Image: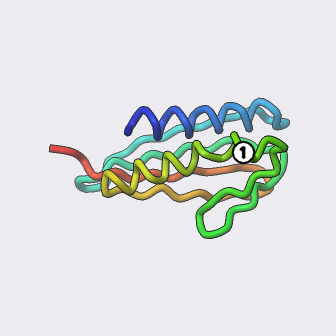
Amino acid sequence: DLCTIYSNLFDNAFKAASVSESKSVDVSFKFAGSNLLCEIRNSVNKKAEIINNELKTDNADKINHGHGTKNALKCAEKNEGTLNFYCTDEFFTAELMLPMLH
């Protein structure tokens, strides 16, 4: 599940940043109590449309596009975590919270 989450989030971040003007990806990890918090923030060339924490795609290949974030969301929820998406005109942010497994 962790591989599914991080591979999809990092893949999306690097792809979006590569076509943006500033080409930046920032990743931070920290602990908050018994939770691991991860924030992945990347530059964008345009603001993504997010409705009910679901990204709307304008990619022409809609059949094979957009499953990665849905899979990451399912894996986060399956492990009692959360994954939220935010976007401005300059940056897209994925905020992941997972409880520490003992």
The residue at the far bottom in this view is 52
**Quarter of the picture holding the N terminus:** top left
* Residue type, mark 1 in image: Ile
Q: How many marks?
A: 1
Q: Is residue 43 above or below residue 19?
A: below
Which residue was labeled with disc 1? 63
Name the element at disc 1: loop
x and y percentages locating residue 54 in the rendered image: 62, 60
Residue occupying the point 61% across, 44% down: 41
Is residue 16 rendered to the left or right of residue 102?
A: right
Specify whether 51 is left or right of 68. right
Determine the residue positioned at 85% across, 36% down. 21
Judge whether 95 appears above or below 102 on screen. below
Among all residues in the image, which is located at the extreme left? 102
Quadrant where the C terminus is found in the figure: top left
Position of residue 5 relative to residue 23, above or below, is: below
Q: Position of residue 75 (x, y in %)?
A: 41, 48
- Front residue of this view, candidates 20 and 80: 80
Where's residue 69, x and y in %? 57, 48
Q: Nearer the viewer, residue 44 or 74?
A: 74
Q: Residue at x 51, y 53 (%)?
A: 95
In the image, 70: left or right of 89? Answer: left
Q: Quadrant of residue 24?
A: top right
The quadrant holding residue 65 is top right
Q: Toward the viewer: 43 or 76?
A: 76
Say whether residue 2 is left or right of residue 49. Answer: left
